[in-house]
Image (cartoon, rainbow, N blue to C red):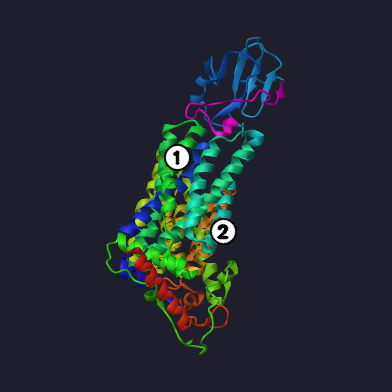
Amino acid sequence: MALSSERLFDSLGHFGRFQACVYFASVFQAMSCGIHYLASVFMAVTPNFVCGFPGNVSNILFHNSSASSIQDIWTLWTSTENYVVVQLENGEIWEINQCSRSKREVSLDLAYEYKGNKSVFSCSDGFLYDDTKWKSTVVTQWDLVCDREWLAKLIQPTFMLGVLIGAVIFGDIADRLGRQRVIWFTSAGQFVFGIAVAFTFDYYSFVTVRFLLAMVSSGYLVVAFVYVTEFVGIKARTWASMHVHAFFAMGIMIVALVGFLVRTWWVYQIFLSIATVPFVLCCWMLPETPFWLLSEERYEDAQKVINTMARWNKVNTPCKVSELCSVQQEDPVSGRTGENDMSSTKKHNILDLFCNWQIARRTITVWLIWFTGSLGYYVFSLSSVSLGGNEYLNLFLIGAVELPCYIIACVAMDKLGRRNTLIPFLILSALICVLIMFIPQDFSILIILANMAGKFSIGVAFGLIYLYTAELYPTIVRSLAVGSGSMMCRVGSVVAPFCVYLRSVWIFMPLLLVGIMALLSGILTIMLPETLGKPLTNTLVEATEMGRNKKSCSGKTPPAHGGAALEKIEMFGQETVSTEK
């Protein structure tokens, strides 16, 4: 049975009032995903710090400046190599570093330079932190500095690991149990785990709860893309799916705003998490997509959703499920008749993305683009936050710069096509990486502009691949395809921080790696089929034929439904229509 999926939108409208309500309700929650993904930027910041003083201090010396309080010294602190000299009330003189402290054996004069003998001690009295910008962070809460610094560096990678696992798990569950159930569970999970993070009692419980938060956030984002794609017709699908990223970017800007206003990490986390509340209260009203219901042969439920769409969109005569289905009495290839189609009831898994050479090659290329997009996105982002100046404004601009790139991507995707937009922007990002290597380090403004251009170009490719993946695969494995692609995306986001660490080997090493990956991805994209203006496919056979390969995944062409199946579909459609009236 082949579903004429786009006939549904021709009948009910490609983006009517019903689709608009469902769309904006769904993408509103995408802001929460952007919030949680970037929340650690300020929550896990490491301020200036030194070892705790071993007693009551009477005087503090920092180079040529003298003070009575460490708070007066922080404005002069410029490097981790700095140290302060303190004189205690008992006359002892100590040199205080970030991760150690030394007692001078001879305590005659209070001077910054000292060549005599010193006894080195550990920071057994804790640490003193600069609270000028942040009153409290998770670093200051649990002293994640010095020999515990590696724990602070694991906060974001462990979150991204949760994102990776959640993308695969919830993508598969959405194909098995439906999109609506997963959307409800993951959105509620974001609120519950988001609030729970603020009340964790130690570092390990903090990381564990954030790991769970990452899983549900990733699960929601993956399934939301599929959900809105299956509710929006061809004429509006490009703009609708692409601007899910715009709401994600708005979440990043909200992080900057809340970070500027709230300087205590657990209060900051609570304020970020309550953004989820409006959607949690109404997400249970969202319907299941008719495409998924039809793929599960739940024709009566599908007809109910279609009738609701028609009523909201003010369509007097809603189409019937039977009108969306074309029944072939005889298989055009094998000539078989009267057999039951088992493909609709088969439980699919990741191996179906490699069912034949055409689909396997497509999957490998798509995964590479996902990985490259994420790697480049975060490498350029990490470079942008070190621009200097106001870090809150920098993060806000990092989110804002994504908004115009999605508009340009939408126009190009509709005019040039998905593939013909993806190829030049991937290659352009590779060329920008090479260009940055030849810009003199003294030309800071030019370097900044080039980095923003690189983030802009990779952002177009990164945003486009969600929709392109959803259109390249059929309904039965669409969530699985997007979920596995998102998994590769998160592998890239986990690798990105380690890629940036390679600057210590060679300052341009991260850009070189991103450039090579972007160039390779752009070349391989040439072999992908164009999906612009084509209806969504429902079976792996149809998806393979879109790649101009007539060979099915099982080596056989699935048999058609018999006439009894059509009669059953028509009966369900008629009963539901009369009930809705």
Near-viewer residue (263 or 337): 337
Q: In the picture shown, does residue 217 fall above or below 545?
A: above
Q: Which residue lies furthest to the top in this view?
A: 90
Residue at the (49%, 37%) spot, across then down: 269
Q: What residue type is labelled 1?
A: Ile
Q: In the picture shown, does residue 52 fall above or below 384?
A: above
- The image quadrant that residue 302 belongs to is bottom left
In magenta stretch: residue 125: yes
Q: Which residue lies under the disc numbered 1?
A: 274
Q: What element carries label 1?
A: helix
* Percent of width and height locating residue 278: 41, 44
Q: Quadrant of the C terminus?
A: bottom left
Q: How far apart are marks 1 and 2 (CA)?
A: 26 Å
Q: Which residue lies under the disc numbered 2?
A: 168
Residue 459 seen in the figure = yes
* Percent of width and height locating residue 169: 57, 57
Q: Is mark 2 on a helix, strand or loop?
A: helix
In magenta stretch: residue 294: no
Is the C-beta separation of discs 1 and 2 under 8 Å? no
Category of crowding for the residue at label 2, using alpha-carbon neighbours closer than 10 angstroms: few (below 14), some (14–19), many (at least 20): many
Magenta region, residue range: 118-141
Q: What residue type is labelled 2?
A: Val
Q: In the picture shown, does residue 324 fall above or below 269?
A: below
